[in-house]
Amino acid sequence: MTQSQNNPRGIVFILLGMATFSIQDALIKFIYEDVALYELYFGRTLVACILLIIYLKTTNQKINLKSHYPFLTILRVICFFFGFSFFYISLTYMSLAMANALFFSSPFFISILATIFLKEKVGIRRWIAIFAGFFGVYIVLNPDFNDFDYMKLAPVACALCYAISMTITKVTSDKDNVYTQMLHLYFGALLISILFFIFTGKGQFNNFSDETFQFIFREWFTNPSYAWPFIIAMGCIGAFAFYFVFNAYSIASPSVVSLYEYSLIIWSIITGYLLFDNIPTVRTFIGVSIIIGAGVYIYFRERVKDQLIVTDTPNR
């Protein structure tokens, strides 16, 4: 069966994947007052890593950790780890919909990085779309420059780090397969989390009254009987989400299924409303519409130019 014939199945998989990611994000927002950030990161990564290894073993696939690009691999791991640290931090003070909308500025960063490092040609129309997308980000942020809270930029920082990671992936994927690269991300995240535990795990730097900074520097394992069932659930949910996403990209055209990743914003609005009673403002809806519109336009221009910079890799 061809990719085009499999596109409907791929769309179903990507919709399921984005819905599952929205549930994972909601659990983080629900539990952050009772767990340390990197305890959570460590736990969910450990669970996801174990599940991936079990999958590779049961499908008789070789587990290969060797990279043909060691320096780029280390850089990608660091960018990915700290990028999603920024995203998880943003969930402590920002709605799910706003955080995910700002995260979707990543295609604009990827296009810019592709022109610099991959020598891809981006024409004037796509540059206009990129600037329009960042204008949408501006609308969502609604900055007051007299008293701007720079913490609002955390999802944008995540998008930039993610864009760097995906640009590197564009280079390394010619020799390192997808499962090798996922294992690199998992083992890297576990190692960095352990380093955070060694230096901050006893809560020695937690002298803050702000809930966000308490989340970052809180002592580990203060309430494991309550927190760890949620953490394990996050790991399982995240693994299922990746399963749906990678199945979508493997059986269908990446340039088709990638469009439906924007459904994550819709799922986040629904989840945020049902669980946290968050209703996005009209301004947020306008900004989100511009971000999605700009991203979709970039997608179509890439198809016209047969130059899939943004749309051939999953967004999570």
Image (cartoon, grey):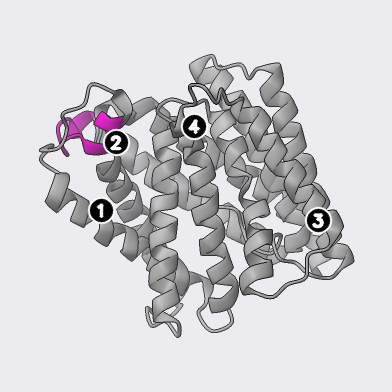
The alpha-carbon separation of the residues under discs 2 and 1 comes to: 19 Å
Indicate which disc, 1 or 4, sits on the residue closer to the N terminus. 4
Residue corresponding to mark 3 = 126
* Relative depth, front residue between 124 and 266: 124
Q: Point out the frontmost of discs 1 and 3.
A: 3
Residue at the (76%, 33%) spot, across then down? 289
Q: Point out the frontmost of discs 2 and 4.
A: 4
- Hey, what amino acid is under mark 3? Arg
Left of 170 or right of it: where is 58?
Answer: left
Callout 2: helix, strand or loop? helix
Residue corresponding to mark 4 = 152
The alpha-carbon separation of the residues under discs 1 and 4 comes to: 24 Å
Callout 4: helix, strand or loop? helix
Q: Tell me: residue 234, above or below residue 48.
A: above
Identify the image quadrant of residue 109: bottom right
Q: Tell me: residue 95, above or below residue 28.
A: above
Q: Answer few, some or many: residues within 10 Å of disc 1's Cα (few below 14, many 20 plus, some between 14 and 19).
A: many
Residue corresponding to mark 2 = 229
- Residue 169, position as x, y percentages in the image: 55, 70
The alpha-carbon separation of the residues under discs 3 and 4 comes to: 26 Å
Report the span colored magenta: 213-226
Asked whether 224 falls inside the magenta stretch, the response is: yes
Residue at the (29%, 40%) spot, across then down? 37
